[in-house]
Amino acid sequence: MGVKVGVIKDDVELDSTLKALARQVAGKGCGALVMFMGFVKGVVDGSAVKELVYEAHESYALEKLREIGEWAIKEFGVEDVVILHRVGALRPGDPTVYVIVTAVTRGKAFEAAAQVLERVKHEAPIYKLEVREDGEYWVLGDGRRLRRGNVEGGGAEA
């Protein structure tokens, strides 16, 4: 498989996806599959989250996700990297991002998955608006939040 990426609106059927991937790589000497799934938090800074709205520049996001996956294969010597990022309005508990890595050893798989996720969070042109009971906030890759509306007015609130 190598690298598989997607910017998707629907959820992923994990059981069959993970089993198929494991079967594909077992014959190549792989014995590890690491999966990370991020999901929408229900509370941030003491305020209830109503939804998280993801938007992406899809063609550039796919290009960047593929670049990150290819980098991980070369950098860590893993077999496969799957990066799937959801878009649209998601509610607390809904999955947002999947990173799946297969490798010969679990150490390589865990290390690659962690680094892939960090790069996705900081480099992919995927934007999120957090709609909370206390307002709306643009969420930056480093966890910083800017109140929506103040950006246009020249001031920003963290």
Image (spheres, grey):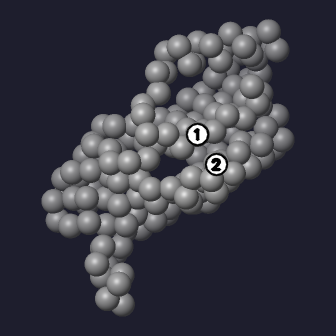
Residue 19, horizontal then vertical, whole percent? 58, 12
Amino acid at dot 1 = Gly
Q: Measured from the top left, where is residue 59 in percent x and y?
A: 63, 53
**Which residue is rendered at x = 79% and y = 38% of the image?**
73
Residue 9 lies left or right of residue 119; in this view the side is left
Q: Where 25 falls versus 46 (above or below)?
A: above
Quick check: 118 above or below 135? Answer: above
Residue drawn at point x = 32 percent, y = 48 percent:
89
Secondary structure of the residue carrying numbered label 1: strand
Residue 62 marker: 2
Type of amino acid under label 2: Leu
Residue 38 visible in the current orientation: no
Judge whether 122 appears above or below 148 on screen. above
Which residue is at a point 49% across and 15% down the rendered structure image?
A: 15
- Quadrant, the N terminus: top right
User: Helix or strand or loop: what does disc 2 sit on?
Assistant: helix
Residue 130 in the image: state x and y as whole percent.
Answer: 31, 59
Left or right of residue 125: residue 95: left
What numbered label is drawn on residue 75? Answer: none
How many marks on residues?
2
Note whether residue 54 is visible.
yes
Which residue occupies the foreground of this view, 12 or 101?
12
Residue that protrudes farthest toward the front in the picture:
59
Question: Is the Cβ of the residue at disc 2 closer than 8 Å to that at disc 1?
Answer: yes
Image disc number at residue 6 = 1
Which quadrant holds residue 23?
top right
